[in-house]
Amino acid sequence: MGARLTLPGTAFPSRRLDAVPAFLRDALADPETGWSLGGFGALAEFRRDPEEPVSALADGRLGLATARGAIALRDLPGLRPVAYETAFGRDWSHAVALCLPEAACAMGRRRVLTELGPDAEAARPEDRGGVLFDLGLGLAAADACLRTRDPATLAALRAAAGRSVLDADVPVLCRLDTLDAHRLFVARIGRIELFAPPGAGPGPRSFIVPRLLRGGRTHAATASIPAGLVPLAACHPSHPCKDREGRRIAYRPERHAAFQALLARWGDPRLLAVKRAVEAGGEPCAADRQARNALRVAHAQALCRPA
């Protein structure tokens, strides 16, 4: 292990989808880039510190592991990146969603706690004997799971098998921080695994929000995902005005330029045109929600840039 990981890859030159593997490699090699995988209401996040020891995966998958978590990805036929920005108040966020057609994204879609057996696809070889349990959250494009070897945890999970963990009398969700188990979110594109317990500070973590799960959405309404596509995961490049913990920093123009290049390549051209019009001094008519969002993003970015 070393403090930094270098993954081979080059900048991608066009909108062509054969550039996706290079994009994934370059993003994984950048410690300032975060990742998420899951669905609306339940997901895992992977982040690492710049000097945190990391190791590459030994089985050919794209990814890396730290002592706190791991990410393992594969390039899939038909995988489509969608770059987008989201305004909130006087601020904005950005991401590159990794999407598949709705018909190709389905995972188990179980709705009860289910034992799946040994986890043969674990990112680290030493974890492949652990027993995998699907929490049964019914996500459209991911399975939220636990993996354990601990006898007491195995007994507790087996006792709750066949029941919904969203039921008030099945206390699995409220006991996640006490269970001796790794948390995993698994999709067609790969997985994020969390080894550190919940609440261990900035870094790999997971979220399960039952009230959002009940809505059955595949993604937030503010994300400009084209109809017919479902996001499986997302890459979160560094923000020009915020650090890894969301605190304000001095404007970093190179970060802004880097994401704008992604937006030009894999974003919605119509929304990009709205932003360009604002940047040129105009105020274009925004006839729908996504266009209004693009307007707000352009104004927020203008406020962030030094005069």
Image (tube, rainbow, N blue to C red):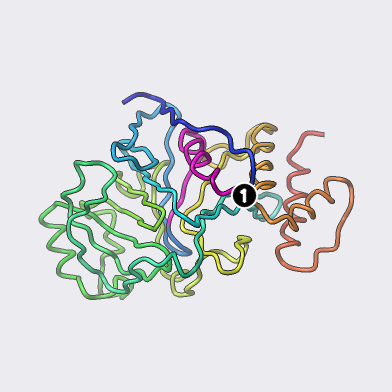
Location of residue 109 with respect to 1 vertically, above or below: below
- Quadrant of image for the N terminus: top left
Q: Nearer the viewer, residue 217 or 264?
A: 264
Relative to 135, is 207 on the left or the right?
A: right
User: Which residue is most to the top?
Assistant: 2
- Residue at point 16% right, 64% down? 156
Local packing at callout 1 (Cα closer than 10 Å; few below 14, some 14-19, many 20+) is some
Query: Residue 138 in the image: x percent, y percent?
Result: 37, 71
Residue farthest to the right, as pictured? 282
State whether residue 68 is above or below residue 219.
above
Q: Percent from the top left, x then y, of residue 29?
A: 46, 33
For label 1, the residue is: 93
Residue 63 location in percent, x, y?
Answer: 38, 40
Q: Is residue 196 left or right of residue 225?
A: left
Total numbered labels = 1
Amino acid carrying label 1: it is Ser
Residue occupying the far left of the picture: 151
Which of the 4 image quarters holds residue 227? bottom right
Could you say whether the residue bearing mark 1 is in a helix, strand or loop?
A: strand
Magenta highlight range: 16-37
Residue 88: x %, y % from top left: 66, 55
Of residue 10 and residue 255, the one placed in the foreground of this image is: 10
In the figure, is residue 284 to the left or right of 272?
A: right
Residue drawn where x is 28% and y is 57% of the image: 176
Residue found at x 63% / y 61%: 224
* Residue drawn at the location 76% of the way across and 49% of the way down: 298
Seen in the picture, residue 174 relative to 304 is either above or below; the reply is below
Q: Nearest the camera: 38 or 89?
A: 38
Quarter of the C terminus within the rendering: top right
Magenta stretch containing residue 56, yes or no? no
Q: Is residue 29 magenta?
A: yes
Using the rendered view, name the quadrant where residue 127 is placed: top left
